[in-house]
Image (cartoon, rainbow, N blue to C red):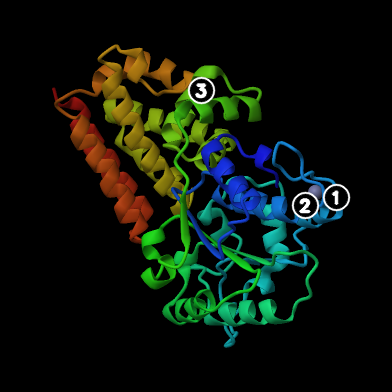
């Protein structure tokens, strides 16, 4: 990973380079900011820049020397990756990151923007909640004391330190309290408040900010050549500063289309009061499975909001893709002051109920019945 692989964040890149050139490299850094903006990539680029045997004059790793090649393959001897993991079923011993090294390498391949949810889905265990187990801190201590040096800096990059349990955090605290020699720990956090304050206070904090919509739209247009400028702008807006979310929305084109189709069906059938067909619709939505149902209802809430705004006729505040917008031409007038809030509320309740393990078929059908009543409201 090179600094140049990460869009924007020039202030942070300059600051990190400066730490190296001024020889003021801290022993512990807390790199923090919202999720999906390239913090892990930044930590990786920083460490690779330090290890690179032939860094460029512009202050970036060369990408070609043996150290850079090892970084690309996640097998640089002086770099330790720590990430939250799950205890496999039937095992009593707590796991360490290294147990999942193959999954990690595959997950990280060509990845600039991290998404904790996608990492969680790597684990097949149901309702997995990956954390840093206490064994991880012991593994770090051991690694720091035994592994041979190839460079002048051994670096630990820990992703999501907020997911340490208390024992792990206390053990890590001892590690950052003691002099580490030339070693460096970088904690990469989406939620720094979740990190033990005594650990936090020993780290040099570096904040990374969310992306602006323009930067995201430009990156998306580059990444997905078939995406129209309008759709890139819309997805950038929905992503709310997270490049990871914008990319997954763009990749998820088929799901977005399916969600729009289901939304259209619901509105048409509810308007025509076709109750038995709505029953079938409810079953279809239930067959998507819980995760997709939740995403569908999240999508519905957005569409209600956007259709309401559509009526004001101000294109600058509208965020609909081209397909959504061609549906809204005729549909938007059905969403108005008298029902917009209630309809969004019905979708929100459906989402909460499904997340709470309610029966999808029943929830979806109830939702459809409520929509019949609300669409008729003036
Ligand atoms: Zn290099």
> Which mark, by number, is residue 52?
2
**Distance from label 1 to label 2 (Cα)?**
7 Å
Identify the mark nearer the N-term, 1 or 2: 2
Q: Disc 2 beta carbon < 8 A from ligand 1?
A: yes
Give me the residue at 81% from left, 57% from top. Answer: 70
Identify the mark nearer the N-term, 3 or 1: 1
* Nearer to us in this view, 25 or 225: 25
Density class for disc 1 (Cα within 10 Å; few <14, some 14-19, many ≥20) is some
Give me the residue at 47% from left, 72% from top. Answer: 164
**Distance from label 3 to label 2 (Cα)?**
39 Å
- Label 3 sits on residue: 231
Density class for disc 2 (Cα within 10 Å; few <14, some 14-19, many ≥20) is many
Image location (x, y in percent) of residue 161 = 49, 66
- Residue 58, compared with residue 22, is above or below; it is above
Q: Quadrant of the C terminus?
A: top left
Identify the mark nearer the N-term, 3 or 2: 2
Give me the residue at 58% from left, 56% from top. Answer: 24
Left or right: residue 195 compared with residue 71: left
Q: Secondary structure at mark 2?
A: loop
Q: Secondary structure at mark 3?
A: helix
Marks 1,2: beta carbons within 8 A: yes
Density class for disc 3 (Cα within 10 Å; few <14, some 14-19, many ≥20) is many
- Label 1 sits on residue: 65
Q: Disc 1 beta carbon < 8 A from ligand 1?
A: yes
Q: Secondary structure at mark 1?
A: loop
Left or right: residue 24 compared with residue 107: left
* Nearer to us in this view, 165 or 94: 165
Give me the residue at 52% from left, 25% from top. Answer: 232
């Amino acid at each position: 990973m090179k600094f140049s692989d990460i869009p924007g964040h020039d202030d942070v890149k300059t600051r990190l380079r400066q730490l190296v050139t001024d020889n003021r490299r801290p022993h512990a850094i807390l790199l923090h900011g919202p999720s999906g903006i390239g913090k892990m990539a930044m930590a990786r680029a920083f460490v690779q820049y330090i290890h690179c045997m032939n860094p460029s004059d512009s202050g970036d790793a060369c990408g070609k020397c043996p150290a850079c090649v090892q970084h690309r393959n996640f097998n640089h001897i002086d770099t330790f990756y720590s990430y939250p993991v799950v205890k496999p079923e039937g095992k009593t011993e707590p796991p360490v990151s290294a147990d999942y090294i193959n999954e990690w390498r595959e997950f990280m391949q060509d990845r600039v923007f991290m998404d904790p949810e996608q990492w969680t889905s790597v684990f097949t265990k149901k309702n997995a909640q990956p954390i840093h187990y206490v064994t991880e801190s012991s593994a770090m201590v051991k690694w720091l004391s035994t592994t041979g040096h190839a460079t002048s800096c051994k670096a630990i990059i820990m992703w999501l330190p907020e997911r340490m349990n208390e024992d792990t955090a206390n053990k890590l605290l001892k590690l950052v309290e003691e002099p580490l020699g030339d070693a460096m720990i970088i904690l990469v956090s989406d939620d720094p408040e979740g990190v033990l304050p005594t650990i936090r206070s020993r780290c040099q904090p570096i904040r990374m900010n969310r992306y602006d919509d323009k930067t995201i739209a430009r990156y998306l247009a580059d990444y997905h050549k078939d995406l129209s400028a309008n759709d890139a702008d819309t997805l950038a807006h929905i992503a709310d500063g997270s490049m990871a979310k914008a990319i997954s929305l763009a990749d998820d084109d088929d799901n977005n289309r399916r969600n729009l189709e289901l939304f259209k069906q619901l509105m048409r059938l509810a308007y025509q009061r076709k109750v038995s067909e709505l029953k079938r619709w409810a079953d279809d939505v239930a067959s998507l499975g819980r995760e997709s149902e939740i995403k569908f209802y999240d999508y519905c809430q957005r569409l209600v909001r956007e259709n309401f705004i559509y009526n004001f006729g101000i294109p600058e505040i509208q965020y609909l893709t081209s397909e959504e917008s061609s549906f809204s031409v005729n549909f938007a007038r059905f969403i108005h002051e008298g029902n917009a809030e209630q309809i969004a509320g019905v979708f929100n309740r459906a989402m909460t109920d499904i997340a709470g393990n309610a029966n999808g078929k029943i929830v979806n059908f109830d939702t459809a019945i409520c929509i019949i009543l609300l669409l008729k409201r003036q």
